[in-house]
Amino acid sequence: MTEKLTDLLNGYPIVNLLGTFERDIESIAYDSRKVEAGGLFVALAGTREDGARYIPEALRRKAAAFITQSSPQQLLEFGVGVNGVTQIHVKDARDALSWISTRYYHQPSQDLNLVGITGTNGKTTLTFLL
């Protein structure tokens, strides 16, 4: 599945952009080991590691673009420079991942059916029947 980066980010607040929005995105990954050529890597900040440390690995795997909440100065410390890949800086990379994934996968939550089961008896049985 291929989507335009411009369509994925349309309406999302971006702090800074280096490169072009005119890119085809073939996949989305937040694990650098799963980045595919032409994909978008979202560098999430964790409790122990900053995902921006793994941007060089994502670039070796031919990522077309990456999203980070790290500053350009931090990226230089991680060995990431201007290299022809689209760099998108946002305030919250997790929020950006949610926004982009919703658009990339064409609003999948709109196709979910939700059923609430309440009461004293029979809830477990009824959930298995559904």
Image: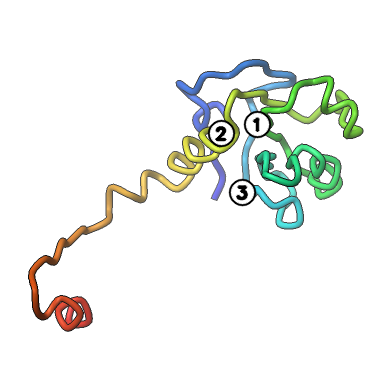
* Residues under numbered marks 1 and 2 in contact, where contact means CB atoms less than 8 Å apart: yes
Q: Secondary structure at mark 1?
A: loop
Q: Secondary structure at mark 2?
A: strand
Distance from Cα at disc 3 to Cα at disc 2: 11 Å
Q: Quadrant of the C terminus?
A: bottom left
Q: Residue 104 placed where, x, y %?
A: 49, 43
Q: Which residue is mark 3?
A: 27
Query: Hey, what amino acid is under mark 3?
Result: Ser
Q: Residue 12 placed where, x, y %?
A: 49, 23
Compared to residue 128, the image places residue 68 above or below, namely above
Q: Residue at x 66, y 32 (%)?
A: 67
19 or 100, which lies in front?
100
Which numbered disc covers residue 81?
none
Q: Residue at x 8, y 69 (%)?
A: 119
Q: Which residue is mark 1?
A: 23
Q: Which residue is mark 2?
A: 4
Distance from Cα at disc 1 to Cα at disc 2: 6 Å
Q: Residues within 10 Å of mark 3 (few under 14, many from 20)?
A: many
Q: Residues within 10 Å of mark 1 (few under 14, many from 20)?
A: many
